[in-house]
Image: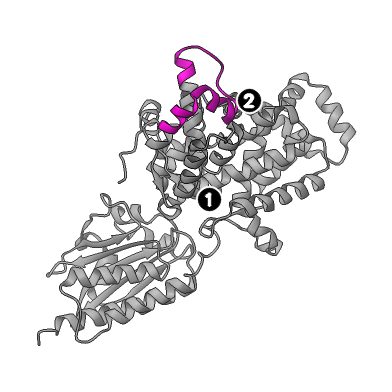
Amino acid sequence: MTRPTPHTLEAWLKLLDSVSLPVPRHSYEQVQAALADNRSSLRDIAEAMQQSPALVLSMMRAANLHNSERNLAEPAESLEIALNRLGLKRAEELLARLPALDQAEIPHGLRQLQMISQHATQQANGLFGNRLARLWQEIHWGSLLFLAPLWPLAMTHPQLLEEWELRVIHKGESARSVELELFGVRLLRLCLTMAEHWHLPAWVRHGYRLLLSERRLLVRVLHIARDDQDALRQQQRMDEDPSLRRLLNQPANTVLLANGLALAAQQAWDCPHMARWQYLAALYLQVPMAELQQQVHQHAVQSAQQHADPDLFHPAEALIWPWSERRVHRGLLPAAPPSAEALVEWRKFCADLLVEPSRFHNPLHLTTYARDALVACGLQRVIMLMAENDSSALRTHQSAGLPSDLAILNLPVSNSTLLQRLLAKPAQIRITPENNAQFSALIPTSLRRLFKGDHLLMRSLSSNGRVIMLVVADQGGGPMSEITVQAFGKTAQCIERAFNGFSQRGG
């Protein structure tokens, strides 16, 4: 269920603090077994727990909140310290209260964000862990938890994060304007507030404070970092300004650098965001840019070997693509085509729709099959709107991949020339970036809010010579797989034939 969208820092804090993040069932069971085994050391238990970032966050939050209330100690900087403070009995009780779900049941956006956190941890360990061996724990756990304030947001409002990414990262809109419009607050301020409220490790809070209050100094450091053809001149420029040298040389910066690299890699290996973080990391490590890039690529591959998931995007995949095609975000590349298994399921649904005499008990039974056929061919968001008998309005009949409370629509046809055209006779419209401006203003606002993005399919279906339904679908708003587009057209034909067969069933 989609929750109301807060627009103040206090309201966001209250909402996100109340979210219970799910743990993958296989990780849950491994940790449960480790806690029950009296031969397990704290390190054994911590290693089992770190396979689930949500579980690490829950334990660290609980331990640090417990100690802050009693003013007993500084926040725990590692999971082992947190477990020691909690005690194993309390850890077992906390585990029992967390929801355990199969991997596929955990929201896609949350899993993608947590995979980015795991990639950042791999980058941090590989780039900085050996050089700063005494600080390995702070580097490791701080890097894993840096994006944790966004994890509950990916549970409650994933569509807002997707829209932010599309508009800020890929369309270049002002982050400030977009964030105030979508969230009512700046995201960095929200993340810092959450990190402070949860008493996350000091290096996590340091990173957000640096981004919020030291941006001018960071820009000056970046100018020096770009001057990478003369290492001696770089060093002299840093030595001339002690404030810059102090800023760059803080070990806590490793957490921010690793997460900057991991986040930028989600967009592209050769994008300006990636170049900035690579220059900063190369200057911090005092290594040539080419050497830094090679290390970053190697650590990405190692992360993919450990954390890749078939339905998530890991930037290591893009390392084998031609350089000119490294536009890695799923919003810029065509969506993946349906798997062979999904296509087998899709064909079965279509075959059932075409059975004669009709096997369906009522229109709802029929459209449920139709909806499932559309999903099986790779469509991620679908809404099926039935026309009133006089074609004056369209009402939601079926939906998939959309918030159930938002997808209940009643669209007057008289208010939209596009709907009038689609209800006049069966037709299909494919919206792309090339024609989006032409059609976007014609789509009712309430429908457009459900399908944000530049790619959309709309098709009206008829039965016995009259348009009875409008189907609207996409693959998350990004470019669509051509296989899915073709399957959408064939499915629509099957649905029309199924309705014709159903209407003649008693004849």
Horizontal and vertical percent position of residue 455: 44, 63
Depth check: give the residue in front, 297 or 308. 308
Q: Secondary structure at mark 1?
A: loop
Can residue 236 be seen at all in this image of the molecule? yes
Residue located beneath label 2 in the image: 214
Residue located beneath label 1 in the image: 171
Q: Tag 1: Cα neighbours inside 10 Å, few (<14), some, or many (≥20)?
A: few
Q: Secondary structure at mark 2?
A: loop
Can residue 421 be seen at all in this image of the molecule? no
Residue at coordinates 26% horizontally, 75% vertically from top-left?
A: 461
Q: Tag 2: Cα neighbours inside 10 Å, few (<14), some, or many (≥20)?
A: few
Horizontal and vertical percent position of residue 364: 19, 68
The outermost residue toward the front is 38
Q: Is residue 453 above or below residue 75?
A: below
Q: Report the span colored magenta.
A: 66-93
Q: Nearer the viewer, mark 1 or mark 2?
A: 2
Q: Is residue 121 above or below residue 405?
A: above
Horizontal and vertical percent position of residue 133: 75, 31
The outermost residue toward the top is 71
Magenta stretch: dominant secondary structure: helix
Q: Amino acid at mark 1?
A: Lys
Q: Amino acid at mark 2?
A: Glu
Depth check: give the residue in front, 23 or 259. 23
Q: Is residue 27 above or below residue 376?
A: above
Residue at coordinates 43% horizontally, 67% vertically from top-left?
A: 378
The outermost residue toward the left is 507
Q: Quadrant of the C terminus?
A: bottom left
Q: Is residue 67 magenta?
A: yes
Horizontal and vertical percent position of residue 212: 57, 27
Q: CA distance from mark 1 to mark 2?
A: 26 Å
